[in-house]
Image (cartoon, helix red, strand yellow):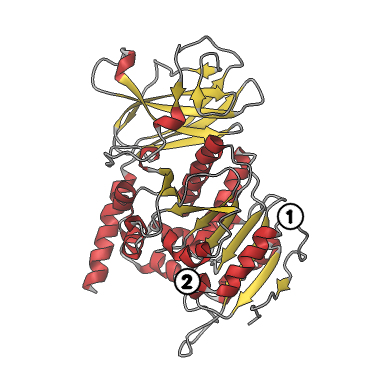
Amino acid sequence: MLLSSCMLLDAREQQALLNRYCSISGDVRSERGEAGALVVLLIRRNDGDAAELRRWEIVDYYVTQKAAPWRFALGEGTYRTAAFDDVNADLIYQPGEPFVGADRSRSFECVNANRYEDVSLAIPATSPVLFDRLIDVGERFSGVRSDSSASNTLGQLTAIGVITDLSDPRFSQENAEGSLWRPHDFIVSSQPGIYFLEPYDERKTPVLFVHGIGGTPANFAYLIARLDRTRYQPWLYLYPSGVYLDLIADHLSQTVMKLQVRYDVERLMVVAHSMGGLVARGFVLRHAKSSALDVPLFVTLSTPWAGHAAAGLGVKHSPVVLDVWRDMAPGSEYLQALFAESLPTETQHHLIFTFSRDRSSFGASDDQAVTVASQLDPAAQAEARRIYGYDDTHRGILRNDRVAALMGELLSSVEEESAPPGQIAGPPGSSAP
């Protein structure tokens, strides 16, 4: 009980810290029509006279390939926004590229969790040359800041293709579980984002791995070790478990977009475990609206599509309610929104569920963590290209050699015709409950 009380106290303080962040959001479009990429710049004033240009510094950026909404989460300060049409999609402003400058008559004072919305940026088809030099946005923000603190923007605290290995302390189980109760500290110290295990190789197709609640990219070690690394490159998404899932899905989509534009990525496969499937589906839906990226394969393992009853109980009875519980509670707005629209037609969803329950347990069938009923929610079944059942536990599925073999088969044959939607398939090593 003491431990539980300490955790809840941590969570209350951490959510208060997150709620202090300011946000600026709006939309961006190019009057030129076709765009390589649209880049929104966030500019912060340093100490001194606001009229002096040198007192302003680019501190974050947002990228989209289509007219779309954008959003920044940031600490206290005075900010302005600008945008340019990145005609050749290299994340570099080059003199002559269409540009809409910061409105000097409008600054955004971020204090006390201010929210600025509906900031519309219309980039003209042509514009005067405002700068006579290159501005390499991609290079400027190619890694996380060494001076990470709560005053940084979320973008400055995000890992964008940082190369590491699965023994990275940020991927420890202790750190992952702590992110549920201390998400603010996790963001500042562990840098959520996408990590690479090797330098980017354009000859290899990226496979994005998305962990579940209290999870870490290291949970996928067994599957990654059996991935054909001559053809595929793992991308590992790290995020705090205690945050609203819509914010996580937004963050994942923007992080992928920055890598996609930087490396001219055309195709991405997605593998997600447990709650990570809810995050990943939100990402796929969002990304389709702002990008031409092809996501032909979407594999989920043991995902609670209908939510989790424990989260619902937490929302109703806990003195401190974690933000993630609100989205994981059955019938939540986030869960309903996931199936309010369909996946892109080119995206094949292969749904894997597990049903190895503890012999001493009672009640609904489960895998020692999530009920089979939630994993086989009718809305998820209806869109699944194929459905596979394994007699394994919720975490055990990540170390299942038959699942590893199935992953290889799916990756190799993603373009081939498969079973009709909703059909329960039985590849070697799988079975129905």
Q: Point out residue 78 in the picture as x, y percentages from the top left corner.
A: 32, 26
- Snapshot quadrant of residue 96: top right
Q: Write the residue at 69% across / 74% down.
A: 427
Identity of the amino acid at label 2? Ala
- Snapshot quadrant of residue 322: bottom left
Q: Residue placed farthest to the top in the image?
A: 128
Q: Residue placed farthest to the front in the image?
A: 230
Q: Which quadrant of the figure contains the C terminus?
A: bottom right
Name the N-terminal-most of marks 2 and 1.
Answer: 2
- Snapshot quadrant of residue 213: bottom left
> Closer to the camera, 94 or 8?
94
Vertical side of 4 occupied by 148: above or below:
above
Front: mark 2 or 1: 1
Q: Point out residue 49 in the picture as x, y percentages from the top left corner.
A: 26, 15
Q: Write the residue at 61% across / 53% down.
A: 231
> Closer to the camera, 307 or 250?
250
Image mark for residue 234: none
Q: Point out residue 271 in the picture as x, y percentages from the top left corner.
A: 56, 59
> Closer to the camera, 71 or 237?
237
Identity of the amino acid at label 1? Glu
Q: Which quadrant of the figure contains the N terminus?
A: bottom left
Q: Secondary structure at mark 1?
A: loop
Vertical side of 32 occupied by 278: above or below:
below
Q: Write the residue at 67% across / 69% down.
A: 387
Image mark for residue 309: 2
How crowded is the residue under tag 2: few (<14 C-alpha within 10 Å), some, or many (20+)? Answer: some
- Left or right, 58 with respect to 31, comes to left
- Left or right, 197 with respect to 261, comes to left
Vertical side of 228 occupied by 152: above or below:
above
Q: Write the residue at 24% across / 70% down.
A: 3
Q: Which residue is mark 1?
A: 415
